[in-house]
Image (spheres, rainbow, N blue to C red):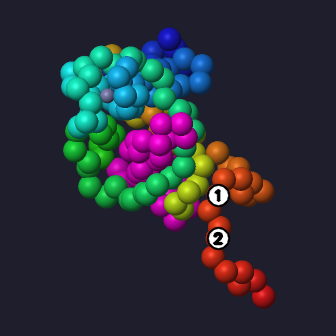
């Protein structure tokens, strides 16, 4: 696969997400109790009440809402992948629409914490993390991008605070 720059794209972590079409994280779902996991679970189910060890690989929701966020001023530990050299960026913990599981991810470039709020809808994109100086490949990772549809829809939302408009 190549980008319009002609460079090959290579995932920063193998098997954690897809690159083609509409990218998606690759997780797993327990065949016994239905518990989702990301990254994909191997061995015993995460559900302490489940003894199943059989998990089906499955793409996860591409959409979710911000559950929490922070400014990453210090390089986060593995397996989170940070650019090199390190530069501060916003990280969001996003609750996936279907799985209701929280997945940490970097926000796309140009979106700072001052633009984020809890409950903001986001979608998953795959974006370049850095260019590998040895192979020349673009090393890519998943990131969260605001969908922009922040107004006009209150379906399923929780009631807001009091009306304080003047
Ligand atoms: Zn299970």
Across and down, in percent, residue 108 comes to 51, 44
User: Which quadrant of the figure has residue 35?
Assistant: top left
Q: Which mark is drawn over residue 160?
A: 2
Give the residue at the far bottom of this rendering: 166
Residue underneath mark 1: 157
User: Which quadrant of the figure has residue 78?
Assistant: top left
Q: Residue at x 60, y 19 (%)?
A: 21
Asked if marks 2 and 1 touch (Cβ < 8 Å), the reply is yes
Across and down, in percent, residue 128 comes to 45, 31
Across and down, in percent, residue 164 comes to 71, 84
Residue 23 higher or lower than 70, as above or below:
above
Dot 2: element: loop
Q: Nearer the viewer, residue 164 or 122?
A: 164
Give the residue at the far top of this rendering: 1
Q: Is mark 2 within 8 Å of ligand 1?
A: no
Q: Is residue 113 left or right of residue 75?
A: right
How many numbered dots are placed on residues in this image? 2
Q: Is residue 21 left or right of residue 82?
A: right
- What is the distance, in whole Å, between disc 2 and disc 1 at their CAs? 8 Å
Q: Residue at x 75, y 83 (%)?
A: 165
Q: Is residue 56 magenta?
A: no
Q: Residues within 10 Å of mark 2 (few under 14, many from 20)?
A: few
Q: Is residue 78 left or right of residue 147?
A: left
Locate the C terminus and report the quarter of the image it occupies: bottom right
Magenta-colored span: 87-116
Q: Is mark 1 within 8 Å of ligand 1?
A: no
Across and down, in percent, residue 10 comes to 40, 19
Q: Residue at x 58, y 55 (%)?
A: 120
Answer yes or no: is residue 22 visible.
yes
Answer yes or no: is residue 138 visible.
no
């Amino acid at each position: 696969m190549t980008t319009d720059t002609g460079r090959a794209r290579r995932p920063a972590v193998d098997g954690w997400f897809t690159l083609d079409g509409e990218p998606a994280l690759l997780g797993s779902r327990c065949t016994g109790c239905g518990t989702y996991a990301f990254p994909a679970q191997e061995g015993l189910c995460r559900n302490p009440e489940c003894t199943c060890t059989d998990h089906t690989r499955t793409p996860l929701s591409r959409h979710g809402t911000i559950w929490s966020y922070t400014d990453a001023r210090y390089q986060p530990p593995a397996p989170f992948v940070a650019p090199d050299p390190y530069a501060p960026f916003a990280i969001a913990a996003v609750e996936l629409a279907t799985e209701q599981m929280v997945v940490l991810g970097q926000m796309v470039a140009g979106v700072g914490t001052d633009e984020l709020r809890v409950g903001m809808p986001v979608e998953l994109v795959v974006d370049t993390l850095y260019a590998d100086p040895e192979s020349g490949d673009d090393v890519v990772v998943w990131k969260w991008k605001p969908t922009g549809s922040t107004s006009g829809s209150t379906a399923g939302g929780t009631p807001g605070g009091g009306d304080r408009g003047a």
